[in-house]
Image (cartoon, rainbow, N blue to C red):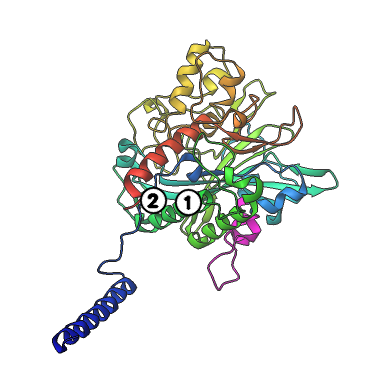
Amino acid sequence: MAKGEIRQSKLRRFFAKLFAAGLMFAVASGVGTAPAETPSKPLSANDVSILFPAPRSPGDLVNLIAVADLAGPTGTPQRLLSDADFARFIANAENPERPGVPDAGVRHIQLPDVVKKIDAWFVAGIRIDPGAPGLSADVIAQFGRQPQIRLIIQPVTNGPDGFKVHDTAGHLIFSFNLDGDPPLDGCAPFPRFKPDDEAFKAIVRDVASLRDQLAAGKFGNVKVSTAGDMNVHPGLVGASAKPFRDAVKALLEKHLSPQRLNTMAVMAISPPEPWVFVSMLRVPQAGLIAVPGPTLDGQHAAQMFSIVGGTHVVPRPVTNNQNPVTCRHAALQNPPLPNANRKGVATADFIDASVPNSRVREIVNIIADPKKSHFFNTDCVSCHTETAQPLARKVQNFAVPGVNRAVLPKEDWNVRNFGWFPSFLHGGPAAATITRRAAAETADVVAFINSQLLNK
């Protein structure tokens, strides 16, 4: 080989090594020719509304998440639900009304002693929501938007009376918001929520990653799809159940903290019935308090649903879901929105009266629509009976799209929206339950996340 050719060959090898080194540096530093991250596929309903299977025996508890086992911030001995907050949860459930409030005829929740211990409570469901109290433009304009993770928790015990899922449920609501905007006229003291979307996008990314790992067979060496109608989460049954449960628990502990827990709710019984509903809010100085019902009279915090009573719904609500959406209501506002200014429907309209099935369908269509009805203009009993009651009455042309038939409520006294219902009338194992209202809210959540937050 000629000297010139030798020099050219050496130069080519030199530049090849230099180029390779530069490429390796670019890849290592995340710049240059490194490929872009593959966008996540759209989420499905079961990805954001995660329902655990109802336990039937003590052995099933290993696949559930015990509330007492949910850790707080790394490096602290704190639990996600502190002893103080749990104590307030129990106290508000059993004695929700403020001193001096006249008796409305609502019986008190009676929790057995075994349920007053945090060790008895398990996560029945998880709702991942980018915007309470609703995601329509009208609701956001009035209230703002508060991203949340809601844990639906229920007590399960194994004692002298055997293994039991109790007809009691709580909501632990962890919020992701920044300092709010000033309230609109007449809506003090509630500021308009301002979402912390950067924090919530991190949750969305982790939810999508779990979905992808599940589909790839990373949990239990089985490939599981979450697509399709809402049901018990498909990753929480079979071989994937325990490892997927562990991954979900890790996700919760990564993103939640006791400081984000600002709202609670409880539904429980005065045995064997009625069912009593109470909502709670953390307020400055006072801490967690029971909140007057936004559709009641501005005083009473508890609402009751009874089978045997002559009046099944007490107090009778005055809803506002047929007026334009407004942030005015009856909870902690002074003065509360007057009854005369409210226009709406409630399931009490047909539970406590004889109306044609066509009217029943009209009423529940409004209650199940998150664009029209939400926590501040529709009562708790309505939102927890809008599916079971028309199904039991065999209302014509009543359908529940997006929900697997296996988890529809099977009797009219099932007041569970998203969780486990143990029937005291018919016995048997607790039934996993999803309602039309839960499905409609989830559909809005999926559409919003996929269009506004995923891959953003």
Quarter of the picture containing the N terminus is bottom left
Q: Is residue 322 left or right of residue 14?
A: right
- Position of 341 with respect to 127 (left or right) is left
Residue shown at the point (45%, 23%) measured from the top left: 365
Badge 2 element: loop
From the viewer's side, name the closer residue of 45 and 120. Answer: 45
Quadrant of residue 250 within the rendered picture:
bottom right
Coordinates of residue 42 in the picture (x, y in percent): 39, 44
Total marks in image: 2
Compared across the picture, whether 435 is left or right of 272 comes to: left
Q: Quick check: can you spot residue 212?
A: yes
Kindly identify which residue carries mark 2.
40
Where is residue 80 drawn, in percent x and y? 57, 61
Residues tagged 2 and 1 counted as in contact (Cβ below 8 A):
yes
Which of the marked residues, 2 or 1, is nearer the chain's N terminus? 2
- The residue depicted at 70 percent of the width and 56 percent of the height is 119
Residue closest to the far right:
160
From the image, tell me which residue sits under label 1. Answer: 212
Whether residue 192 is visible here, answered yes or no, is no
**Residue 419 location, quadrant:** top right
Magenta residues, start to end: 66-89
Magenta stretch: residue 153 in it? no
- Could you say whether the residue bearing mark 1 is in a helix, strand or loop? helix
Residue 451: x %, y % from top left:
33, 43
Q: Mark 2 and mark 1: span between their CA atoms?
A: 9 Å
